[in-house]
Amino acid sequence: MEATGLYCFTLTNFLAINTIDIWVEHASRIKKSTALERGKMTR
């Protein structure tokens, strides 16, 4: 998920308490990713 500060805190806290794996990534790294484009999936 994208790190959005306080907006994602409740969800990440819930997932951590329930031992569900999560990956929080900074928005700039997601945007610069070559594998994903906004609104499109590449195959």
Image: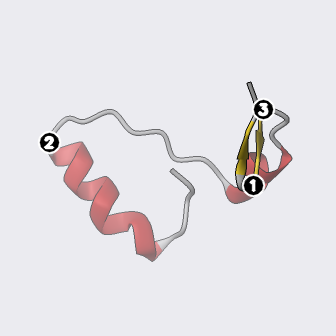
SS of the residue under disc 2: loop
Is disc 1 surrounded by few (<14), some (14 to 19) or many (20+) residues within 10 Å? Answer: few
How much space separates mark 2 and mark 3, taking CA atoms? Answer: 30 Å
Question: Would you place residue 43 above or below residue 1 in this image?
Answer: above
SS of the residue under disc 3: loop
Q: Are marks 1 and 2 in contact (CB under 8 Å)?
A: no
The residue where tag 1 is placed is: 38
The residue where tag 3 is placed is: 35
- Give the quarter of the image for residue 43: top right
Q: Closer to the camera: disc 1 or disc 2? A: 1
Residue at the far top: name it.
43
Amino acid type of the residue tagged 1 in the rendering: Arg
How much space separates mark 1 and mark 3, taking CA atoms? Answer: 10 Å
Q: Earlier in the sequence, mark 1 or mark 2?
A: 2
SS of the residue under disc 1: loop
Q: Are marks 1 and 3 in contact (CB under 8 Å)?
A: no
Amino acid type of the residue tagged 3 in the rendering: Ala
Amino acid type of the residue tagged 2 in the rendering: Asn
Q: Earlier in the sequence, mark 2 or mark 3?
A: 2
Q: Specify the label residue 29 is tagged with.
A: none
The residue where tag 2 is placed is: 18
Q: Residue 16 at what x, y percent from top left? A: 25, 44
Q: Residue at x 30, y 60 (%)?
A: 11
Is disc 2 surrounded by few (<14), some (14 to 19) or many (20+) residues within 10 Å? Answer: few
Is disc 3 surrounded by few (<14), some (14 to 19) or many (20+) residues within 10 Å? Answer: few
Q: Would you say 11 lies left or right of 1 here?
A: left
Q: Would you say 26 lies left or right of 37 here?
A: left
Q: Residue 42 at what x, y percent from top left? A: 76, 32
Q: Residue 26 at what x, y percent from top left? A: 66, 53
Question: Would you place residue 40 above or below residue 10 in this image?
Answer: above
Q: Are marks 2 and 3 in contact (CB under 8 Å)?
A: no
